[in-house]
């Protein structure tokens, strides 16, 4: 009887995109290091005009386009077409990177623990779209990005890693988005590496993580200088 063993070599990763592909660019740069524990084997887009496809071609990574539009509401049909391309390429791990299609429960369940997404907010705050404008409107002092395993609920999956940035006075959506994006480009390659090497695993609906953890805490604005007790009013007016 054949033994059930982890396939030898690095997991073959498909990056799924719909647009510019700047996170894809960060993954490509990281995966150039021979020590990186995942191989970017396929970039699949649901739009032929996704700029990220060009980044993949330049890097010599195989590309596939499965247009979602002709499938209309037939999401399962679209996913079956996508699944065929993933199988052809021997894909073991999926990284969603600005992939703008909601996936069915069937597809997500089939890839449970093997599909990651990056979202531009500190989940569970601000799932969905327009996260930066919503963060500014809500008045939060910290914002950021999250890499999580994908589960059927949109932007609800178990969290692997997060990176926070300050929201500064005068920030508009563009400034805040750029600050978050810079962190996305650091976080996603690291999180994908942990997942690919088994250091981030989905177990019982939670992420088991063997990765370095930051200590301490931070606040924004910094509570410094602290008001001295003497300076505080002792009586209410
Ligand atoms: C990123 O902000 C990512 O967090 C979100 O979609 C955007 C994709 O940007 N899921 P890019 O295509 O990677 O530049």
Image (cartoon, grey):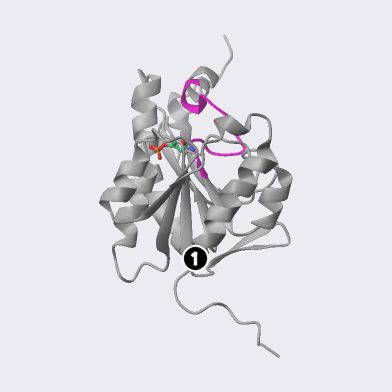
Name the image quarter holding residue 38: bottom left
Q: Is residue 78 left or right of residue 12?
A: right
Q: Which residues are magenta?
A: 118-133
Which residue lies under the disc numbered 1?
196
Q: Measuring from the top left, give residue 120's x and y in whole percent.
A: 48, 36
**Residue 216: in sight, yes or no?**
no
The reply to whether the residue tagged 1 has its Cβ within 8 angstroms of ligand 1 is no
30 lies above or below 199: above
Of 81 and 101, the residue lying toward us: 81
Q: Measuring from the top left, give residue 126's x and y in whole percent.
A: 58, 30
Query: Which image quarter has ligand 1?
Result: top left
**Residue 8: in sight, yes or no?**
yes
Name the image quarter holding residue 218: top left
> Residue at 43% of width from left, 24% of height from top?
231
Of 237 and 108, the residue lying toward us: 108
2 lies above or below 85: below
Q: Measuring from the top left, give residue 144's x and y in whole percent.
A: 46, 37
């Amino acid at each position: 009887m054949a033994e059930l063993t982890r396939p030898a070599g690095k997991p073959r990763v498909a990056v799924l995109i719909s647009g510019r592909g700047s996170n894809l660019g960060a993954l490509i740069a990281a995966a150039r290091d021979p020590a990186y524990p995942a191989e970017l084997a396929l970039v699949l887009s649901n739009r032929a005009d996704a700029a990220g496809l060009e980044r993949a071609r330049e890097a010599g990574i195989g590309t596939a386009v499965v247009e979602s539009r002709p499938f209309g509401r037939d999401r399962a049909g679209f996913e079956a077409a996508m699944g065929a391309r993933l199988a052809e390429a021997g894909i073991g791990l999926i990284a969603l990177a600005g992939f703008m299609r909601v996936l069915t429960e069937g597809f997500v369940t089939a890839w449970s623990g093997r599909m990651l997404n990056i979202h531009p907010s500190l989940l569970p705050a601000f799932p969905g779209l327009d996260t930066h404008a919503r963060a500014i409107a809500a008045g939060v002092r910290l914002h950021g990005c999250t890499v999580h395993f994908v589960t059927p609920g949109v932007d609800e999956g178990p969290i692997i890693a997060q990176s926070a940035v300050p929201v500064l006075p005068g920030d508009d959506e563009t400034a805040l988005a750029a600050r978050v994006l810079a962190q996305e480009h650091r976080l996603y390659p690291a999180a994908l590496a942990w997942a690919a090497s088994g250091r981030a695993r989905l177990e019982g609906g939670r992420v088991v993580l063997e990765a370095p953890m930051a200590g301490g805490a931070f606040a924004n604005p910094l509570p410094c200088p602290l008001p001295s007790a003497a300076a505080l009013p002792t009586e209410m007016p």
